Image (cartoon, rainbow, N blue to C red):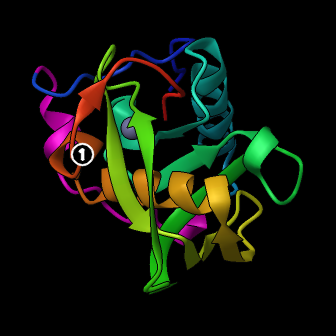
Amino acid sequence: MKYASPLQICLEGRDDVVRIKTQEVPTDQILTDEMQSYFDELIQTMLQYDGIGIAANQAGQSWQVFVVHKDYSPTGEHLVVINPRMVSMSERTHTMEEGCLSVPGVYGGVERASKVRLKGLGRDGAVLDLKSKGMLARILQHEYDHLQAVVFIDKATHLSDRKHSM
Ligand SMILES: [Zn+2]
């Protein structure tokens, strides 16, 4: 299967896939050409829409996959995270404005853990163990929520009109 480039962004309130919990990616498919090109399409889609992260179900696939922009990635490359699970979250929280590619034009303050540890698999199939703080911790929580069918507006305490979209 060849994916259209960029992938179409799915919108909250229009596309059901945003509100359906995603499925694990079979680990024996991670290294297939099809899946690898899908990861590339997801990255390109994030870049095309000026996102700093994107989850697969924001682009039509109900898979447990999200991408983090290289500007926030510990590897310095766009980070693909597959089948993630949240291992720990700090008690300490921080509130900051967020936006979302699936809710264009809407921004709101969201309280999130200041630090999180998340484990998953990378696009090479190897284990990723991400200990994060700051913006990366926020992106990981935002994208992880997407995979659970949770959108930031569910958690936002107020709405306004600027900043990055994930
Ligand atoms: Zn989002």
* Up-down relation of residue 21 to residue 83 (above or below): above
Q: Is residue 89 left or right of residue 128?
A: left
* Up-down relation of residue 44 to residue 54 (above or below): above
Q: Quadrant of ligand 1?
A: top left
Q: Quadrant of residue 98?
A: top left
Assign a secondary structure to mark 1.
Answer: loop
Can you identify the residue that label 1 sits on? Answer: 156
Q: Nearer the viewer, residue 163 or 10?
A: 163
Q: Quadrant of residue 57?
A: top left
Question: Where's residue 142, x and y in %?
Answer: 42, 52
Q: Quadrant of residue 127?
A: bottom right
Q: Is residue 94 left or right of residue 6?
A: left
Question: Where's residue 147, x and y in %?
Answer: 33, 55
Q: Is residue 57 left or right of residue 19?
A: right
User: At x 63% / y 39%, what residue is drawn?
Assistant: 39
Question: Where's residue 48, x and y in %?
Answer: 62, 13
Q: Nearer the viewer, residue 158 or 44?
A: 158
Amino acid type shown at disc 1 = Ala
Q: Is residue 78 visible?
A: no
Question: Where's residue 108, x and y in %?
Answer: 31, 35
User: At x 34% / y 43%, what residue is drawn?
Assistant: 109
User: Magenta part mainly helix, strand or loop?
Assistant: loop
The span picked out in magenta is 14-28
Is 26 part of what is drawn in magenta? yes
Residue at the far right in the pictured view: 76
User: At x 24% / y 29%, what residue is drawn?
Assistant: 159
Q: Is residue 46 visible?
A: yes
User: At x 32% / y 26%, what residue is drawn?
Assistant: 102
